[in-house]
Amino acid sequence: MTHGEEPLRYEVLGLLRVVRAGQEVDLGAAKQRAVLAVLLLARGTPVSRGQIIEAVWGDNVPSSAVNLVQTYVAGLRRALEPARARRAPAELLTSVGDGYLMRVDPGALDLDVFERQVLLANRLRAAGDLAGAAVELDDALALFRAEPLGGVSGLFFDVERGRLVERRLAVLEERAELGLAIGQGPELVSQLTAVVAEHPLRERGHGLLMRALVQAGRQAEALAAYREARGVLIEELGVEPGPELRRVHQAVLAGESPEPARAPVRTTPQAPAEPAPVTVPAQLPRAPVSLVGRDAEVAVMDALLRGHDGPVLLVTGPAGVGKTALALHWAHRVRDEFPDGQLYVDVHGYDPNREPLEIGEVLNRFLRALGVPAGDTPVSVDERSALLRTLLADRRMLVMLDNVRSSADLLPLLPGAPSCVVVTSRRRLVGLVAQVEAKLVELDMLDPDAAVAVLGRIAGRSDVEAHALRELAELCDGLPLALRIAAARLAVSPKLRAAELVEELQDEHGRLAALGLEDGEGTVRAALDASRRALPALPSRLLAIIGLHPGADLTPHVVAAMGEVPLLEAQRSLDALTAANLLSVSEPGRHFAHDLVRVYTKTLAGELSEPERRAATGRMFDYYLHCADIADGLLPINRGSVLVAPEHRPVHVPALSGAADAMAWFDAERANLIAAAELASATGWHVHAWQLPYTLSRYLWLRTERETSLRITQAALQAAIALNDDDARFVMQFNVGIALLQMERYDEALHAQRNALEVARRKEDVHQQARALTTIAGTLQDMGRAEEAETHYREAMEISRVAGSKWAEANAHHHLGLLYLSGRRFDEAMPWLRVALRMYHEVGEQCGEAACHVDISTALLETGDMESALSSARTALAVACDAVSPYHQALAHDRLATVFDRLGAAGAAAHWQRALALFTELGAPEADGVRARLARARAVTVG
């Protein structure tokens, strides 16, 4: 809450309201109120946008639902924190992952107050203070002002409303039981009569009314109440009253005072004949000296404790990330809220030197801690589990289960409310979440500032430079275990300079060894090995094979190819590795390893046999080559006639059906394809070293990634030379020339293109000669050597015609038209451009078509044919959109803007803005010219 604002009170047990200083806060439209209701009902748990949308709209989700949720959240933030500065972060309704968390102060939500008072009443009743318990329940029931969740509608809220109504009735019946136990029967008759009238099918209400009537001396009315209840049950449900209601009836007939079937509750505390000591265990190990960088997680755990009765908190994360440290820190922080004690056990789920504790042994330890003599412990695990639940039923305890491997180890150990259970595990225990709705608290690596703080505090040396600590923190990947080991080495070795340790850790091959201790325990390698040992055989094997992958992330498809396993098995294995926190998910379908785990996987890969490593690496190259070849073939730009033939065609490949799919696939796999090409070049896989860059070249051209294209193409050229393959050598020499030309390095481009032409002539390949001549001509044109350029264009055109290469002929026509266009010879340019356009269309070269339409629009505009110029520019944009070419879309927008500007029509600025955005995103140099034209247009408008 913003400093200085009055505290808020939230009400859901009646009309949905928020009140500040006695004044109701305006919560806005109905749907906005509904969003708030969803967040409040979550009671301190983050709610995803998808969950909010489902709750608020049900089956009628509008297409703009995501935007609407964001709008409603913004409106709620303004209403709840009106004094918050515009750009200041929200304190009450915060963003968490892909959703939101409503932070509610203790006692601010009436539902929380209700449940706490019921909990206190239960404890007072267990202690024998029935009158005090009755007062607490009266106060709790008074919080229901009307039907819950008033003012919000929908199936989700109907279900929640029904749940709250049922909860109120259950508490009201408990209150009646207490009242009867302390002789308040006469006072309860009118209230219970109303309950029975409103809920005639609840047998317990009828029984309570009969008992209240008997206490009031109205036995005849009690019998009449039974007859009425029986009649309703038979008429509505076709059943006789249940055994409890019949027992009350028999007691009234016999003139006895009917009591509940369960043991009577004492009206006053009763002291035992011999005082028995109450065991209050305090088993928590020592808390960590300090905890750095985990404030957000501690706040989430605090909120989960406030928002739920008897929560099970599952703290999960990779090995060495500090799960136990966080859990112990938080447990000590809140232990005063658990006056009945704390139980702790380390299950040793990942200890390489000992077997995990069996459930029976853990139960024995807990029962002994609670004062059960060894001789009184039941034999069977089920009986011990039942006894534990009985002993904890009315006690508020904190139970911590450390280093758990599976959900099966837990379920018999879990008490009910009001105790809280904290579990730590390297795995996301899906079974625990599904069966007991455990709340996940996921730990990731520390941020750089927190990592540096850990290093500085433990090292305790003033001579360590800040930049050295930063480098150490980065090399330790923000992993607390690694940070502590590195800092400990500095602390115990005063002569060890931080720069020396940095240099040692920079060597990936020795990094894990450098993050070890003399005793071999508590090291990063040991922690990761323990996580791997807990895996099934296939995920364990694939973890080593993943270490051969050069990219930053990977998909199930490439893992299936590398491991020669079915796609479903690869997916399941990646899920298992993710559940074990050895991998993480960057986005759906893509997995990655943090730096130290990546180093670990490389170490495991190095332990594979040489034939296994080579085979898996080859299958990876073949997978990327095959998929890139498919995607390249879908791009709307001529790809020449080079055949790509991977040795092993992968079984499972992504389904790509058009240019948009192809570009999306290339965008997603770009970094991996480049890394694979560079690895192939560095390790002597010469065929893949030139064919991978070849399949990437058109994509990189469309994305105007000039530097990247030049780098990998130059390496590919060396691979082609090593293979003594003239076909490969021409293609790579040609592509080097294109990349240099795009970077305006004209002399180098001309040299590379002439080398390509020499190779083509040596091979007597007229198709390649035509392509080389056209590119040489384009370079000469850009260098201002127009006459030489025209000669080369015409030579290329003639060779293309003879060779029957329509694309090359179209390209030569197009560029000759451009040459005339640049010389303002518009009438001469038009015939060449129109022929080029027709040829491009015939061969399906959409990018060439779009560019030709732009150039024709330019010629038409300069000759005064405004309407035709506008039409050509619009056609250029449509074709560029069909081609999924952002570069050509930007060219078309720029041309449209120029035409609109000449016409003096509105729209020029909008098209220039779109062109500028596209060119800027692509990193294209054309952005500077568009920016200048847009600035001039705006200056004219202002003037």
Image: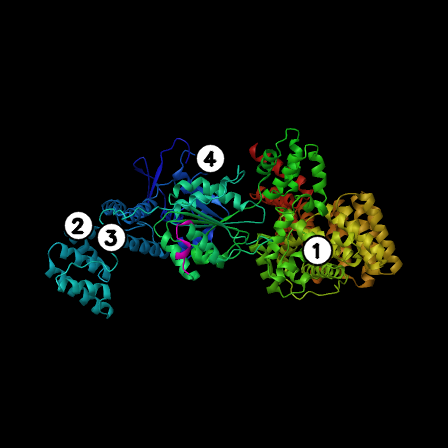
Extreme-top residue of the structure: 462
Choose the circle earlier in sequence order: 1 or 2.
Answer: 2
Question: Considering the image in quadrants, where does the N terminus appear?
Answer: top left
Residue 941 placed where, x, y %? 57, 35
Disc number for residue 86 = 4
Secondary element under disc 4, as helix, strand or loop, is: loop
Local packing at callout 4 (Cα closer than 10 Å; few below 14, some 14-19, many 20+) is: few
**Mark 4 and mark 1 residues within 8 Å of each other at the beta carbon:** no
At label 3, which amino acid type do we have?
A: Val
Local packing at callout 1 (Cα closer than 10 Å; few below 14, some 14-19, many 20+) is: many
Which sits in the foreground, 816 or 587? 587
Q: Residue under circle 3?
A: 265
**Mark 1 and mark 2 residues within 8 Å of each other at the beta carbon:** no
Helix, strand or loop: magenta stretch: loop
Q: Is residue 370 magenta?
A: yes
Q: Residue under circle 1?
A: 605
> In front: mark 1 or mark 3?
3
Distance between the Cα atoms at labels 4 and 2?
57 Å
At label 4, which amino acid type do we have?
A: Arg
Choose the circle earlier in sequence order: 4 or 2.
Answer: 4
At label 2, which amino acid type do we have?
A: Gln
At label 1, which amino acid type do we have?
A: Ala
Q: Residue 546 occupies which quadrant of the picture? A: bottom right
Secondary element under disc 2, as helix, strand or loop, is: loop
Left or right, residue 408 beside residue 857: left
> In front: mark 3 or mark 2?
3
Q: Which residues are magenta?
A: 369-378
Secondary element under disc 3, as helix, strand or loop, is: loop
Q: Residue under circle 2?
A: 184
Residue 812 placed where, x, y %? 78, 55
